[in-house]
Image (tube, rainbow, N blue to C red):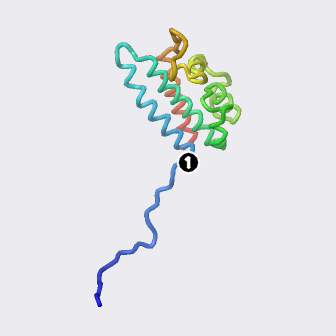
Amino acid sequence: MMHISGTMNAVESGDYIRPPTDAEGYLATARAMLDGARPLVLTTPIPAIALSLLCGYAAEAALKASLAQAGVSTKELGSRALGHELIRLWLRAVAEGVALQASPPQWIEHLNRVHSAPYHLRYPLGFHAIVLPNQAAMLQGCEELCSMAISCIK
């Protein structure tokens, strides 16, 4: 018969790190997209399609972060009605009491045209040119949306 001996260390309760809320998850995405967008304005020429694509996702995620914090479910945020629709997300955020101006600014209206269906930024099919938002206004607006989302979540 074999005898086995040893020691064991037991911990009554393990370390716990709470999972992020949906709002915090969306906010992390918004911040990550902005981190990718910022260096692009320092290059010449500015890669406007790449910058617009990152800003589109940053704006969408920041708006969804504020809406999730206001209690809108991730299922609704991912629905066809809201999904990638920046204008609809903006207006819903205003309706939910998020501190935004009542009507969406021009930069987000322009960004919505290329960010939402049929997703011209991702799939430039069937056309020869694309009109993008003012790059400086768009980046500044995304920075402000992200700051707004941070203040909602804290």
Residue extending farthest to the top is: 128
**Residue 114: x %, y % from top left:** 56, 19
76 over 114 or under it: above or below: below
Q: Quadrant of residue 95?
A: top right
Q: Which quadrant of the view contains residue 127?
A: top right
Query: Residue 79's spot in the image, x, y percent?
Result: 66, 36
> Relative to the observer, which residue lies in front, 11 or 96?
11
The three-letter code of the residue at mark 1 reads Thr
Residue that protrudes farthest toward the bottom in the picture: 1
The residue beneath circle 1 is 21
- Residue 150, percent across and down? 52, 38
- Placement of the N terminus among the 4 image quadrants: bottom left
Q: Residues within 10 Å of mark 1 (few under 14, many from 20)?
A: few
Residue 148: percent from left, percent from top: 55, 33
For this orientation, the residue located farthest to the right is 95
* Quadrant of the image containing the C terminus: top right
User: What residue is shown at x 45% (from left), y 30% (from top)?
Assistant: 34
Residue at image coords 29%, 88%: 3
On screen, residue 97 versus residue 136, left or right, reads right
**In front: 74, or 129?**
129
Q: Residue at x 68, y 28 (%)?
A: 91
Q: Residue at x 49, y 21 (%)?
A: 52
Relative to 24, residue 36 above or below = above
Residue 117 image-quadrant placement:
top right
Check disc 1 and report its element: helix, strand or loop.
Answer: loop
